[in-house]
């Protein structure tokens, strides 16, 4: 029996994914809207889901929407933004209790689908081709606060600055929130115009996860999710052009901080759809992905150079980031040891224990992700982004088949691109 029972229907205007499982007492409805990153409308796009979830034609305030969620037995509605490769993703999530655990027949799934449909297709003032200006102004203030907060969280700031430097003049350099400078120019009218464009042009996937009747879900989807008839044929996946770094870029900034943030960006030249992706996952696990990794053991534990030291891969852009928090006077030595650990990987200098333990932890990590409806969708949505299809079982088997030689070969594809260091003033 497959770990995940996913059925996909092409509804012509979007894709419907039903994942039937009895693991949860809830049903999750998750809508993903994907668009290629462009600077022109990114800030409007960052504002849009928060304006949409604030009011509808019939529920004209956040208070009324919260009351409706309470009527749906404490349903929860959230939205967020993310970036996968050169794509900007808007996500709406609506979690409801399963009918089985309620005291009476409620038709709660259809009511929840109707609510999400109203939020998406029937916004307040939508008949006038605008959004409620008070809501727009309120959410603009909130967006500004989020953007400004990036400067106060130094780990996130260092991560953002590394990406800006490494992907300079590339779409991936942009932050999911857009830019502070473009917030003021947004109003209810021009945001609504962008909203209509997004409904026509975004690549849309609707996931329903839980102990569901797929046919009932299909009928509800047909009833409540009707997108504009003039929707364009969207491009499902973009190919990433792997750039060769001509030299290692180094950028050092100073701020009033106590602990330096050393982030290093590498080009892996491997993305999710590449046959070497599983080997890259194993490489990253040994190099810096887990607590037994070379970075954690050698940079943090043996040399006591860093408060934290780890690595992570971005699956759709071909990037790996090494992140560490260090005293400023340890900069040169830390960079040297990180390079040394990468060289060891390139020379196949890792133990059988590191290799086997990493595979086990990788597979456990995937299996743990399946314990959450959002995690299931997150794993499956990678395939939409990369325009590939395989089962979770096949993913786990691919990790099992990775050989030491493949990990070494992957290591030799990895190139250091940019070093970004945020240090204390005068340090």
Image (cartoon, helix red, strand yellow):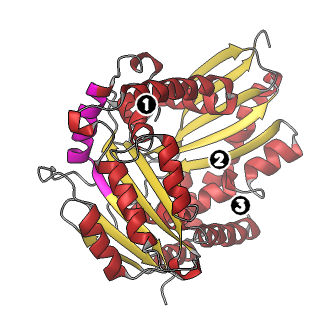
Magenta residues, start to end? 189-204
Residue pointed to by mark 1: 135
Residue 350 is marked as 3
Q: Residue at x 62, y 26 (%)?
A: 149
Please report whichever mark, 3 or 2, sits nearer to the chain's N-terminal start.
Answer: 2
- Secondary structure under tag 2 reads strand
- In the image, 408 versus 126, the foreground residue is 126
Tell me the crowding category of disc 2: few under 14, some 14 to 19, or many 20 or more residues within 10 angstroms, Cα based: many
Residue 43 is marked as none
| Residue 286: x %, y % from top left | 68, 58
Kindly tell me whether residue 269 is visible in this rendering. Answer: yes
Q: Is residue 403 left or right of residue 185?
A: right
| Residue 43: x %, y % from top left | 39, 28
Tell me the crowding category of disc 1: few under 14, some 14 to 19, or many 20 or more residues within 10 angstroms, Cα based: some
Q: Is residue 51 left or right of residue 414?
A: left
- Depth check, mark 1 against mark 2: the one in front is 1
- Secondary structure under tag 1 reads helix
| Residue 184: x %, y % from top left | 40, 16
Please report whichever mark, 1 or 2, sits nearer to the chain's N-terminal start.
Answer: 1
Please tell me whether residue 394 belongs to the stretch shown in magenta. no
The C terminus appears in which quarter of the rendering? top right
Please tell me whether residue 201 belongs to the stretch shown in magenta. yes
């Amino acid at each position: 029996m497959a770990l995940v029972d996913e059925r996909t229907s092409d509804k012509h205007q979007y894709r419907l994914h039903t994942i039937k499982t009895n693991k949860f007492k809830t049903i999750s409805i998750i809508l993903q809207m994907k668009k290629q990153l462009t600077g022109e409308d990114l800030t409007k796009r960052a504002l849009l889901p928060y304006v949409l979830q604030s009011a509808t034609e019939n529920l004209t305030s956040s208070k009324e929407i919260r009351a409706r969620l309470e009527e749906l037995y404490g349903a929860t509605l959230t939205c967020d933004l993310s970036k996968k490769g050169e794509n900007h993703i808007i996500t709406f999530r609506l979690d409801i209790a399963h009918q089985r655990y309620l005291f009476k027949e409620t038709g709660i799934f259809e009511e929840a689908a109707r609510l999400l449909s109203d939020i998406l297709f029937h916004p307040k003032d939508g008949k006038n081709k605008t959004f409620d200006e008070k809501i727009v102004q309120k959410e603009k203030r909130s967006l500004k606060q989020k953007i400004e907060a990036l400067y106060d969280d130094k780990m996130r700031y260092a991560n953002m600055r590394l990406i800006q430097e490494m992907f300079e003049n590339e779409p991936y350099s942009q932050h999911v929130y857009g830019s502070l400078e473009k917030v003021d120019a947004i109003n209810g009218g021009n945001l609504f115009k962008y909203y209509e464009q997004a409904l026509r042009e975004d690549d849309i996937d609707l996931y329903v996860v839980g102990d569901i009747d797929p046919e009932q879900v299909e009928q509800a989807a047909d009833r409540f999710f009707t997108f504009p008839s003039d929707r364009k044929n969207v491009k499902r996946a973009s190919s990433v052009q792997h750039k060769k770094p001509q030299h290692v870029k180094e950028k050092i900034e100073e701020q009033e901080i106590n602990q330096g943030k050393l982030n290093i960006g590498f080009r892996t030249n491997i993305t999710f759809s590449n046959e070497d992706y599983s080997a890259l996952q194993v490489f990253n696990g040994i190099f810096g992905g887990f607590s037994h990794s070379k970075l954690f053991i050698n940079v943090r534990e043996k040399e006591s150079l860093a408060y934290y030291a780890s690595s992570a891969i971005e699956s759709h852009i071909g990037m790996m980031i090494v992140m560490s928090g260090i005293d400023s006077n340890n900069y040169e030595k830390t960079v040297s040891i990180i390079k040394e650990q990468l060289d060891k990987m390139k020379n196949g200098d890792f133990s059988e224990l590191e290799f086997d333990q990493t595979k086990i932890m990788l597979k456990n990590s995937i299996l743990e992700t399946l314990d959450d409806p959002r995690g299931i969708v997150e794993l499956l949505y990678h395939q939409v982004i990369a325009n590939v299809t395989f089962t979770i079982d096949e993913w786990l088997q691919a990790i099992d088949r990775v050989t030491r030689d493949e990990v070494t070969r992957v290591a030799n594809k990895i190139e250091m691109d940019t070093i970004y260091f945020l240090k204390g003033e005068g340090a």
